[in-house]
Image (cartoon, rainbow, N blue to C red):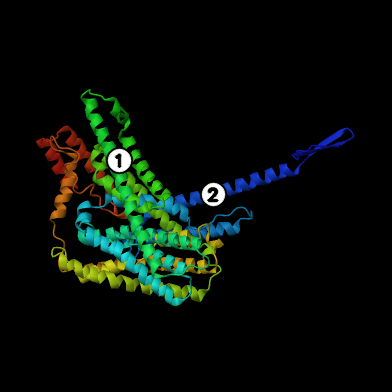
């Protein structure tokens, strides 16, 4: 008998016959390999289902929302996610292998690092600069001051329940101050209601960024207090001022970083444009030769990588990557965009929009599937969840009314040109009442970093309440969004009159036929006027073809009458 000390095999000698039996390590290796293959198979099945659900939303989403009086694209994608979650539950139950399991938990880390950045960047890149800059004060009041007021009122309402600790109250207050105005923005046509659309769009972007910064400020403040003292940290006046100070500092530094990266990209693209002109004139300089390789494909990839680098650097420095990414996209569209080649300008717009739309639909699918995750509904008290949901919903509506109506009244006093009517005020209130995927991701990020199954009773109650409220907003309130918004828009006494907005659109379409001697920075007053939030683009293919025709006509007849005639024909087709 000869036993090998490695444990891989055991050789048994019995007379002239010799046999080999598998050792313990060999059996463990085989078992581990089988388990790995089973897990890989489950992951592949999950990916296949996700792709099928995405294809379903892409192909049927527009048709369903146009035919239905109640469904929006967000609610439709969430329902599709629910169906996908049910399919995964059935597959998990029918599998005999205990290792074959697909989790329905919402991946909060993927949301913040993968899914949310393309949406925020495209919002900054496609926002209408003229409307944004002309309404900066009003948008800032709604998006920043309104978020802080909602945070205070919601936190006060939660504290009156005496169900949670101080840190939980403030964290939940900051999470529930994040709105989801996508459903309303999908209904509002920016050409018919430019002012109302601009206000809702700008508030939604700044609100999401402010809520994320506010949550991190709350977490950082209580972590510093708990590390410097013993016992439970209490909420005092100094604590609130510390949170607000951290919020302001983080917001300003993140904004500065985003603008700086955007300006750097504009400078590099301007060098590339200068080098191209030098190459045409056969005048080369060694210091600029590195930018010769930035073709159209390289330019698009360069913008994506530089924007994501800004996001990662901001997160590494404990700043807000979302704020950085939004202002980076805003700066790139205002400066860098005009130093790109004509083909790169068209490509970047549609590539960034496709990435944003794909991420948005994925988020709603995950919300629908995560609602069926068992870990979100275990270890909770039903009556506590119901009471918390009711209190949160009431406090959200009250906070919206408290700050929206006074701000709209002040807007009507200092701006005689754009006066908000009562119906428009109610639309703004309704848009900010809805809650969506941002709240789900933030509650998972704050209360269940690993998974909802590891959360305690208090955290489980918060997670269940937020999930129930978000589902109620997306599905139930989402059904009433279309009829309510259309009914309120009928009460407008002054319809939109074409004027300034038409001149902006015309300048955008003529951008691809520049006059002789014009520079890239001579017509950047409004940026790439693709003011379509998320999934409101429906005629992008026709617009792209029109823009390509204009670009080709402009490149061959710059400043000539033929080029202008081609541009006019393209404008008429658009």
Image point 30% across, 68% down: which residue? 430
Percent of width and height locating residue 541 = 28, 46
Q: Is residue 342 visible?
A: yes
Residue on which disc 1 sits: 265
Residue furthest to the front? 229
8 displayed left or right of 202:
right
Residue on which disc 2 sits: 43
191 displayed left or right of 461:
left
Q: Please rate how many residues cluster around mark 1, counting C-alpha atoms within 10 Å: few if below 14, some from 14 to 19, many from 20.
A: many
Percent of width and height locating residue 98 = 63, 55
Of 212 and 203, the residue lying toward us: 212
Percent of width and height locating residue 196 = 23, 62
Image point 55% across, 59% down: which residue? 90
Spatial CA distance of label 1 from label 2 is 38 Å
* Quadrant housing the N terminus: top right
Percent of width and height locating residue 179 = 35, 63
* Dot 1: element: helix
Image mark for residue 55: none
Of 93 and 413, the residue lying toward us: 413
């Amino acid at each position: 008998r000869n036993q090998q000390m490695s444990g891989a095999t055991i050789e048994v000698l019995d007379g002239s016959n010799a046999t080999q039996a598998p050792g313990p390590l060999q059996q463990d290796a085989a078992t581990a390999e089988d388990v790995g293959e089973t897990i890989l198979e489950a992951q592949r099945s999950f990916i296949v289902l996700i792709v099928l659900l995405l294809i379903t939303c892409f192909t049927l989403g527009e048709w369903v929302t146009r035919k239905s009086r109640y469904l929006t694209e967000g609610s439709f994608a969430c329902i599709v996610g629910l169906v996908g979650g049910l399919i995964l539950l059935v597959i998990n139950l029918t599998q005999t292998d205990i290792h074959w399991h697909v989790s329905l938990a919402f991946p909060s880390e993927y949301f913040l690092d993968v899914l949310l950045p393309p949406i925020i960047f495209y919002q900054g890149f496609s926002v209408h600069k003229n409307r944004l800059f002309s309404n900066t004060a009003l948008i800032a009041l709604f998006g920043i001051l309104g978020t802080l007021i909602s945070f205070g009122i919601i936190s006060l309402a939660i504290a009156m329940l005496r169900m949670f600790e101080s840190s939980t109250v403030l964290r939940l207050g900051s999470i529930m101050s994040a709105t989801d105005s996508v459903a309303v923005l999908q209904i509002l046509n920016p050409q018919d209601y430019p002012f109302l659309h601009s206000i809702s769009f700008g508030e939604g972007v700044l609100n999401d960024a402010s809520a994320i910064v506010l949550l991190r400020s709350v977490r950082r403040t209580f972590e510093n207090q708990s590390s410097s003292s013993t016992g439970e940290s209490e909420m005092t006046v100094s604590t609130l001022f510390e949170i607000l100070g951290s919020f302001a500092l983080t917001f300003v530094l993140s904004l500065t970083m985003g603008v700086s990266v955007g300006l750097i990209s504009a400078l590099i693209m301007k060098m590339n444009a200068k080098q191209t002109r030098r190459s045409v004139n056969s005048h080369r300089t060694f210091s600029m030769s590195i930018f010769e390789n930035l073709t159209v494909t390289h330019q698009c990839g360069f913008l994506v990588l530089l924007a994501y680098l800004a996001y990662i650097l901001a997160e590494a420095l404990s700043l807000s990557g979302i704020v950085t990414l939004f202002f980076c996209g805003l700066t790139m569209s205002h400066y860098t965009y005009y130093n790109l080649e004509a083909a790169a300008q068209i490509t970047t717009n549609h590539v960034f929009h496709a990435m944003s739309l794909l991420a948005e639909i994925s988020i709603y699918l995950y919300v629908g599937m995560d609602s069926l995750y068992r870990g979100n509904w275990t270890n909770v008290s039903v009556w506590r969840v119901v009471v918390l949901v009711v209190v949160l919903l009431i406090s959200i509506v009250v906070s919206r009314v408290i700050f929206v109506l006074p701000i709209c009244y002040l807007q009507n006093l200092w701006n005689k040109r754009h006066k908000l009517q009562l119906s428009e005020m109610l639309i703004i209130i309704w848009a900010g009442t809805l809650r969506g995927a941002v709240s789900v991701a933030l509650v998972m990020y704050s209360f269940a970093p690993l998974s909802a199954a590891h959360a305690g009773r208090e955290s489980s109650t918060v997670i269940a309440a937020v999930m129930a409220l978000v589902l109620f907003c997306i599905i139930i309130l989402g059904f009433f969004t279309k009829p309510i918004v259309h009914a309120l828009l009928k009460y407008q006494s002054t319809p939109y009159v074409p004027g300034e907005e038409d001149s902006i659109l015309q300048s955008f379409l003529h951008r691809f036929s520049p006059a002789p001697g014009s520079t890239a920075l001579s017509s950047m007053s409004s940026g790439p006027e693709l003011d379509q939030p998320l999934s409101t683009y429906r005629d992008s293919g026709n617009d792209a073809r029109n823009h390509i025709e204009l670009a080709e006509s402009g490149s061959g007849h710059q400043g000539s009458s033929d080029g202008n005639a081609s541009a006019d024909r393209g404008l008429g087709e658009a």
